[in-house]
Amino acid sequence: MAVVEVAGVGQEQGSEDPVLLLREQGGGRRYLAIWIGAPEATALAAAEVAATLPRPLTHRLLLDAVEAFGAQLVGVRLTALVDGQFHAELDLTTSDGGSRSVSARASDAVTLAVHQGCTIEVSEDVLSEAALPSNAVATVGGPEDEPDETEAGTTATSADVEDEVEALRRALSEATPDDFRLDEE
């Protein structure tokens, strides 16, 4: 398992779909892009900026309910990629000192981890199958946007990647939950 951190939430170029970008800590510094829903993007934005909302969003509500029963979320693991869908496990400690794992969607698991401030891990199998190398992050968006290794000068430098990640962080820190609402809401 590799420990990852949230590098940012943005949108795929040419799309309004939110994308969660996770970055491997240490090691290969690989990235994992996970398309998420608007509610998860809103919850992540609220957690990242430590926004105090008048009523808890679903993710905060779930954590409050877990704690009300004497349990605590201690970590999340992205464990598999099945038919393009990321699968995750929530690791909980129980009031009697035991531990339990609960299956979850990856986007929900990461959102809960950000709210709780706990570790996010990704299995090596998932990273091997789905991770983007650090030089491809500036072109996250789909196969047509990935750099062609046969063309000289088309890959991003590590400075470009860090600039892109910093831009995502700035955008996220300035975002409000309203920025992630769909026009139909």
Image (cartoon, rainbow, N blue to C red):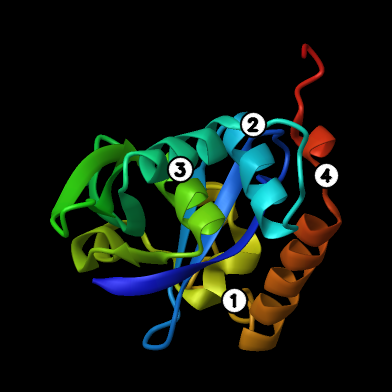
- Which amino acid type is marked by label 4? Thr
**Foreground label between 3 and 4:** 3
Write down the residue under mark 4. Answer: 176
For residue 30, side relative to residue 17 (left or right): left
Write down the residue under mark 2. Answer: 38
* Distance in Å between CA atoms under marks 2 and 4: 12 Å
Circles 2 and 4 in contact, beta carbons < 8 Å: no
- Which residue does the image show at 48% across and 40% down from the upper left? 64
Give the secondary structure at mark 1: loop
- Which amino acid type is marked by label 3? Leu
Query: Residue 109, how many percent across, how many down?
Result: 40, 46
Give the secondary structure at mark 2: helix
**Residue 83 sits in which quadrant?**
top left
Circles 1 and 2 in contact, beta carbons < 8 Å: no
**Where's the C terminus, which quadrant?**
top right
| First of labels 2, 3 by sequence position | 2
* Distance in Å between CA atoms under marks 3 and 4: 21 Å
Query: Residue 32, how many percent across, how many down?
Result: 44, 60
* Distance in Å between CA atoms under marks 4 and 1: 32 Å
**Residue 158 sits in which quadrant?**
bottom right
Residue 36 seen in this snapshot = no
**Where's the N terminus, which quadrant?**
bottom left
For residue 17, side relative to residue 51 (left or right): left
Density class for disc 2 (Cα within 10 Å; few <14, some 14-19, many ≥20) is some
Query: Residue 8, how many percent across, how many down?
Result: 64, 60
| First of labels 2, 4 by sequence position | 2
Q: Which mark is residue 63?
A: 3
For residue 15, side relative to residue 101 (left or right): right
| First of labels 4, 1 by sequence position | 1
